[in-house]
Image (spheres, rainbow, N blue to C red):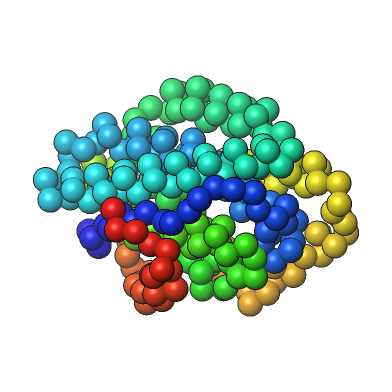
Amino acid sequence: MTEEIIPRKIKFTPGDFPRHWLRNSPLYTHFCNTFTLLFPGAESFFLRSVRPFLSDCPPEFRENIKKFMIQETNHSRVHLQLISVLKNQGYRVDEFLNFYSFLLFDVLEKILGDRMNLSLTAGFEHFTAMFAELALKGNLLENGDPDLIAVFKWHCLEELNHKSVAYDVLVQSGISYPERALGMSIALFLFSTFTGLGVFQFLFQDESIDWTENFQEFGRFMTLGGVGESILRRYLEYFNPDFHPENHDTSDLMSRTIFELKDSLIPY
């Protein structure tokens, strides 16, 4: 079972921020901007995926699910505010968002059905926890706009806090290993496709970028400290029949992040 879920809010007032707000880098910035576009729709999907299986869960676990839903709703609210700022900066994102929403939620969600939607959610939650740990442990969220860095660290913290919820619901509901593995395989395709499309649509609209430098920076990122190897290893862990998110302890990392954000976090 997952640890106790503790929803927190973040002190944040939306306003303008630098165009390249993270490390003065278009690449790092637009990865985070893309996640901002993806999160609200994805998190609403996660909640819809879990709800049909609540009756399969013991009463004491439903309280954690409720808190997980509160966390995801809070994240969506903040990222929707950030999307408004991105639009004010001149980025054209509606076409991307409409395509993303149509394909995932109007088409795939209806085709896949409840069991595969839950499997897909558990796979996505493994990705978010994996990248949250990578960002916090690798100090990737440093050297930039302090308010936005705090927002993304807060989001990473809560992704680690609830990393087991969807998976525990999956186990409680009797989802089979083949269904779990297929859900993760679909999640990999969708995550990679829409992250890539999102980053490139931002870069193409950013007239000041140097494409050669950005490709070189991506190469440095993937090789720095074995990041690429770490991502692959953590992804493949999910296919171990004995996998559970809590097998990978991130409690110390969470404690460090809570301390760093002590002046920005608000108890729910």
Quadrant where the N terminus is found in the figure? bottom left
Residue found at x 49% / y 35%: 41
In this rendered view, identify the residue nearer to me: 16 or 72: 16
Estimate the x, y position of residue 16 in percent, counting from the top left. 64, 49
User: Image quadrant of residue 70?
Assistant: top left
User: Image quadrant of residue 201?
Assistant: top right
In this rendered view, identify the residue nearer to me: 84 or 15: 15
Estimate the x, y position of residue 216 in percent, counting from the top left. 82, 64
Q: Is residue 113 left or right of residue 206?
A: left
Q: How many marks?
A: 0
In this rendered view, identify the residue nearer to me: 204 or 115: 204
User: Image quadrant of residue 229?
Assistant: bottom right
In this rendered view, identify the residue nearer to me: 2 or 186: 2
Asked if 18 appears above or below 115 in the picture, the reply is below
Q: Is residue 236 left or right of residue 168?
A: right
Q: Is residue 58 left or right of residue 6?
A: left
Asked if 252 appears above or below 92 in the picture, the reply is below
Residue found at x 62% / y 27%: 99
Estimate the x, y position of residue 116 in percent, counting from the top left. 39, 35
Estimate the x, y position of residue 114 in percent, counting from the top left. 34, 30
Q: Is residue 173 left or right of residue 82?
A: left
Residue found at x 64% / y 65%: 144
Residue found at x 35% / y 33%: 48
Asked if 14 appears above or below 135 in the picture, the reply is above
Q: Is residue 30 visible?
A: yes
Q: Is residue 191 visible?
A: no
